[in-house]
Image: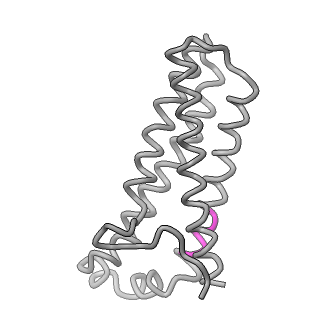
Amino acid sequence: MYETALVVHNILRLAVLAVGLWVMVRAFSGWFGAKPWKIADRTSVLVLTILVDVQLLIGILLHVVWSPLTKGAWADMSSAMQDAPVRKFFIEHPILMILGVALVHMGKSTGKGAPTDKARHRKLAIYVTVAVVLFAVGSSWPWQEVARPWLRMPG
């Protein structure tokens, strides 16, 4: 189950970033182009929200139930904090991801009360941009010291 969840979590990482960029383009275009709020805007935010929620659920299960790395960290917190890769996945990654998910939800909900479509696009653009930056920074990439492949497949 651990390997399957890790593969799905990894694939969803790319989907979250792609859809996040899609939402950003629509939001900035609406903000600076003074475009009306459309069903496609609502749909893009809804898809992003669903993706980040599913990603968060899988991440929590990995973190608390399945991951041998975090099980070891829970058992010996002192050692975990001194080991950069373990600390990254045990503390830094979950905090940044939870903040990003919260920002996506805030962008989705605060825009509803905006007085104009431009204001709604602006709020969404700001919240989602910060969230996508947090997702990108908090993820592990092949070129980093704590590296993860672009796409992990079961093997």
Q: Position of residue 148 (x, y in %)?
A: 42, 73
Q: Position of residue 41 (x, y in %)?
A: 68, 29
Query: Which residue is situated farthest in the left direction here?
Result: 82
Residue drawn at point x = 26 percent, y = 80 percent: 83
Q: Is residue 61 magenta?
A: yes
Residue 8 located left or right of residue 126: right
Res. 59 in view: no
The secondary structure that most of the magenta stretch takes on is helix
Residue drawn at point x = 39 percent, y = 65 percent: 141
* Image quadrant occupied by the N terminus: bottom right
- Colour setting: one colour
* Snapshot quadrant of residue 19: top right
Q: In this picture, which residue range is highlighted in magenta? A: 57-62
- The answer to whether residue 140 is above or below residue 63 is above
For this rendering, which residue is in front, 116 or 31? 31
Res. 67 in view: yes
Residue drawn at point x = 61 percent, y = 11 percent: 116
Residue drawn at point x = 65 percent, y = 37 percent: 45
For this rendering, which residue is in front, 31 or 73? 31
- The answer to whether residue 99 is above or below residue 71 is above
For this rendering, which residue is in front, 17 or 78? 17
Q: Position of residue 20 (x, y in %)?
A: 55, 43
Q: Position of residue 110 (x, y in %)?
A: 58, 28
